[in-house]
Image (tube, rainbow, N blue to C red):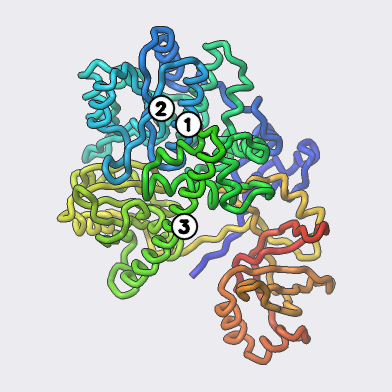
Amino acid sequence: MEKWSIRNKKNELEKNAQALGISELLCKVLVNRGISDFDSAMSFIKPDFDKLHDPRMMKDLVKGVGLIKRKIAEGKKIRIVGDYDVDGVISTCLLYKALLRCKAKVDYDIPHRIQDGYGINEVMIKKAKDDGIDTLITCDNGISAIEPINYAKTLGLTVIITDHHEVPFTEDTDGTRSYQKPNADAIIDIKQMDCFYPFKILCGAGVAFKFIQVLFEEMSLPKEEAFSFVEYVAIATVCDVVDLIGENRIFVKKGLEMLNKTRNTGLKALIKRTGIEGKTLDVYALGFIIGPCINASGRLDSAKKGLRLLLSDDLQDASDLALELHALNTERKDMTIKGVEEIVQMIESSTIKNAKVFIIYKPDIHESIAGIIAGKIRERYNVPTIVLTDAEQGVKGSGRSIEGYNMFEELTKCHELLMRFGGHAMAAGVSLDASNVEALRERLNRLTKLTEDDLIRKIRVDGLISLDRINLALAQDLTILEPYGKGNSKPLFAETDISVSRSSILGVNKNVLKLKLLTKSSKSLDCVYFGDINAFQDVIIDKFGSDELDKMRSGYKNNVKLDMIFTVEVNEYNGNRTVQLILKNYR
């Protein structure tokens, strides 16, 4: 079931269309995305580096840079500790390249997903001490590592945290929260209550980049060198699924420009291996092709292989690593498909499907893909989902949430059932004893305030639009809003009572439905649907009858009328540019 609604935010910004140099339709779309003042709109339309905030506003950033600058001068050994996902690998790459440029004595370490688990731990800290390391700097982790960092301090190590995750807290019965932070020498995390940096949704690589900006200033290095790292930040920003607004939009927009002419040997090898060489890289390429290959090394092998690819200057080495990462990602995809199929069967054949929060325990799922599977189950059922599996110690898993359900805060209410947990509103990771799985399922479902209405999939369109208004100029105008992603999805438009003059099935696998739509003034518009064609045809038969479906297929006059939600695209084929609709939902 779906609930359609029209975004209808009112704002004076629509009157500023002329001043902004854009159409009223674009203004409306911006307002629908919460961009409600002239300066924010101009920054969105023309994202550039001069619109980035001053990184010195970030709590402890200047302090942390000062510590690193002094350690470099003293010749102390520095070790970066990253994380095994794309954001962690990219963050480690950024800091490593930057510190080498500053002539630091630096190396790196990344925990193994299976053997070490998430984030810095006491084994890694002991090894750092034994290796003569003086200073540890974390990236994309550390804020929740209270005990490990306390241990590091007892060993006399200097510790700097750069992170973007939520600060852990406990909550009293009256709702009072007590925030707990590690005893680090500098904590750079935008989620701290006393950090007044204005943009709170950077990924870990975004925070690391801010650190590098100030470090290069302090080391009298050209700011252009710092900005050259933005191509890497773009990959992490897309793959960590943070909102592509504000600074994140600038990183991705400018980063894609750089990536399309990248000189990074490893990235070029991966682009070639994945078959996208010569094509224009976009958000899809980062989020569904390049990023997953880097991520696959951390899921099924060692994340250091993905990092080695990014750091490689040797053509043969880069080619070999790209081949290996691509193969790992193919294996990961196959495992994911199998896991999703098995869990859907579990849900459909049990009482799990009646729950408002899915806690799915499947001992033989590879723990590295639990989060991916949780995301796909969440997409299918629109229910917050945590997938658990057996780990080396107890049970481990990952969760993905829906709008209106803060998974991190809900898990906080169950903290005594968990060995470890962390994350944010839309995603979290947990470790617990197998004996507590049922208790976790019961408590999360008992405490949730989700209603049946909350679990109905909401589709919000940017406005009703007559098909007669749609032309190539409008489609080209909308491209100003690119790149699209979380927080800045492609604008959705709707029209009711649309006539379909003809349908045909295309593609090698017969999986594309092409529709000819008739406007009210009898003009024709192309529309393409990539969804379930059989289900679409069943709806037509159920409502209008098989004769009308046959007429529609043959291009004869018919009585088929549909309400549609669609995006408006520029279709390029053989050098020709035309307008085309992509059908997203129908009724």
Say which residue label 1 marks: 93
Label 1 to label 3: alpha-carbon separation: 24 Å
Secondary structure under tag 3 reads helix
The image's mark for residue 162 is 2
**What amino acid does circle 1 point to?**
Cys
Q: Nearer the viewer, residue 200 or 280?
A: 280
The reply to whether residue 77 is in sight is yes
Q: Earlier in the sequence, mark 3 or mark 2?
A: 2
Q: Which mark is residue 330?
A: 3
Is 489 in front, or is 72? 72
Position of residue 212 in the picture relative to residue 489 (left or right): left
Identify residue type, mark 2: Thr
Q: Quadrant of residue 302?
A: top left
Left/right placement of residue 200 relative to residue 8 reads left
Q: Position of residue 511 (x, y in %)?
A: 61, 73
Q: Which image quadrant: the C terminus?
A: bottom right
Most extreme residue toward the front, as rendered? 316
Q: Rounded to the nearest whole Å, what is the CA distance between mark 3 and mark 2?
A: 32 Å
The first of marks 1 and 2 along the sequence is 1
> Which label belongs to residue 338?
none
Q: Residue furthest top?
A: 74
The three-letter code of the residue at mark 3 reads Thr
Considering depth in this image, is 573 or 12 the residue closer to the camera? 573
